[in-house]
Amino acid sequence: TEITETLSAEAVILRAMNAVMQEAGYVQKTGNNDFHGYRYATEADVLDRLRPAMVKHGLILIPSVQQVSSIDQYGNTTVSVHYTLAHVSGAVWPQPIVAAGCGSDRSKSGVGDKGLYKALTGANKYMLFKLFQIETGDDPEQSQGDRDREAADRTARQFYLESGKIAISKAETSTNIS
């Protein structure tokens, strides 16, 4: 008697997401905003960390722009993007993942044409950060207190990942095949 496990579409995707989260838990901030004086993780940083793990575990995100605003008086453009989350097995998450973005391309010479692209980049980057609960950080040479907090955060994250595995396993069904 052979036992075959049949998983729901949600369970297939949740298992793959969990595997991606285990591999891609941290993104270094390499971008620098000189004008406002802060560091940030770029979309390229996030994709560099996430894409290999997503491909390895069969996850696919398909974006579809749903709404684009007119440029406002401050030069801002906003977008709403719906993402279809799918797995190479054919499983598809039942609801779209919705992300919003805002981009501005205003300078002394007027409003440029890059606001839409900045809005799309922001929507994509922050959707990925939130969907996969990606951490960011600054300089790897941190204080001992910073390292202790990060160790505690890693322990807590591992606890939640293990809890997620338990929740996923409860969403599965098994079928006996004679």
Image: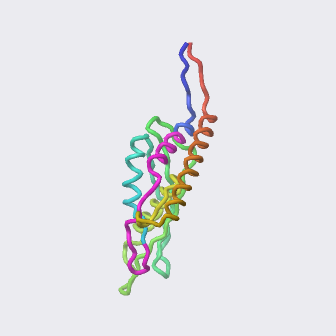
Looking at the picture, how far across and down is residue 141, in whole percent?
41, 65
Q: Give the residue drawn at x 49%, y 78%.
A: 72
Residue at image position (57%, 48%) is: 95
Q: Quadrant of the C terminus?
A: top right
Residue 126 location, x and y as percent?
A: 49, 61
Residue 169, quarter of picture? top right
Q: Residue furthest bottom?
A: 108
Residue occupying image coordinates x 38% and y 72%: 32
Q: Quadrant of residue 164?
A: top right
Specify whether residue 109 is painted magenta. no
Front-most of residues 85 and 126: 126
Residue 123 spot, x, y in % from top left? 48, 62
> In this picture, is 103 found above or below 173?
below
14 is within the stretch colored magenta: yes
* Residue 68 percent across, percent down from the top left: 48, 66
Residues drawn in magenta: 13-38
30 and 158: which is toward the camera: 158
